[in-house]
Amino acid sequence: MNDQYLKKLDRITAILTQLQSRPLVKARDLAEKFDVSIRTIYRDVKTLENAGIPIVGEAGSGYSLMEGYKLPPVMFTKEEVLSFITAEKLMKKFLHESLGNHYQTAMEKVRSVLKFSDRNLIGHIEKQIDVFDYHPKTEDRTRNIIPLILESIAEKKQITIQYETADSVVSERVIEVVGVFFEFNYWYIMAFCTLRNDFRQFRADRILKILKTDQPFLQEYGQINDYRQAPGGNKTRVRLLVNKAIIGHLTNSKIYYGLTGEIERDNGVEMIFETDWIKEGFPRWLITFADHAEILEPESLRDSLEQLMAGISKKITV
């Protein structure tokens, strides 16, 4: 049995798994996933059909399994089983408390279809994995917020929230949620705010009340990463020359602040950003490592940083 045949067998098995787990699978997506041509995917689907798998659909639209058709439980590899254990440990710490019980129930179902040897493997190794120094900031009032938010995304229904800002101003908002994300120990909601007629971020723990409505979304939305910075905003190009010694400490935050490229220089790393937070957010982030960075452009960022530092110095010396 040659390698080419084994690769095809693995790919066909993986395609069948995709068909079991999704309502519709497109040939183009499968081709990208497995790094093969679309014609190869067509042939693989034909192979499954010839083997008696009732696949509905055709080239160009998408494929799905016939309604009501059931397949035996999927068998997991040892590597996949080990990844489940690690993911379970991480998710218990990382998931919002309101979703934790659902995840645990799902994992119990996964365990139930494992081979005895794999269940035994889990019993031996799960106590050897843990996640330390993780302290998510959650409160009792946020426990039911994330599940309701996810429901509103799935059903494309507006929700009404009572939101408290950082300076304790409370307002009523009607929002259409694009997605949720976790960052800097808080859950955030990215949504279109009908009051502001623009996209806004809302911190979940600042939502005092929440109610899902029957009003459908007024527009379609893309993926959450398309909206992490205000769409259509006027972005400013920023170039910094940063000491190589601290680059490793900026791994996550540099992406958040709009990193578009890095160029290694003899005297440091030139970091290039496109940001619409040039007046407030960016200079406040830059001040945390300003003694290891040189502003190459724009001049306005240098002015903003100097003003910010002068204000801090004034408060310290008073």
Image (cartoon, rainbow, N blue to C red):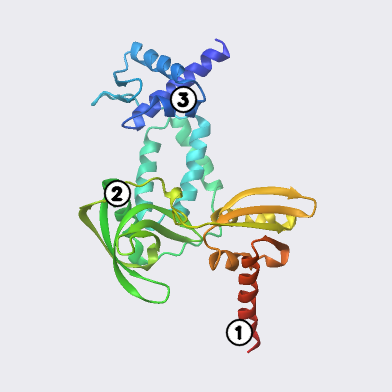
Q: Position of residue 28 (x, y in %)?
A: 42, 26
Residue at mark 1: 315
Question: Type of residue at label 3?
Answer: Ala
Measured in 3D between alpha carbons, the distance from the residue under mark 3 to the one under mark 2, in whole angstroms, is 30 Å
Q: Quadrant of the C terminus?
A: bottom right
Q: Residue furthest right?
A: 266
Name the amino acid, label 1.
Lys
Q: Secondary structure at mark 2?
A: loop
Q: CA distance from mark 3 to mark 1?
A: 60 Å
Q: Amino acid at mark 2?
A: Gln
Of marks 2 and 1, the one in the foreground: 2
**Percent coordinates x, y for residue 114 in the rendering:** 41, 32
Q: Quadrant of residue 110?
A: top left
Residue plotted at (35% across, 11% down):
50
Q: Residues within 10 Å of mark 2 (few under 14, many from 20)?
A: few
Q: Earlier in the sequence, mark 2 or mark 1?
A: 2
State left or right for residue 266 relative to residue 94.
right
Question: Which residue in the structure is indicated by mark 3?
Answer: 31
Describe residue 153's horizontal placement relative to residue 132 as left or right: left
Q: Are marks 2 and 1 in contact (CB under 8 Å)?
A: no
Please state the horizontal and vertical placement of residue 290, each as a whole percent of the image: 68, 66
Residue wearing tag 2:
219
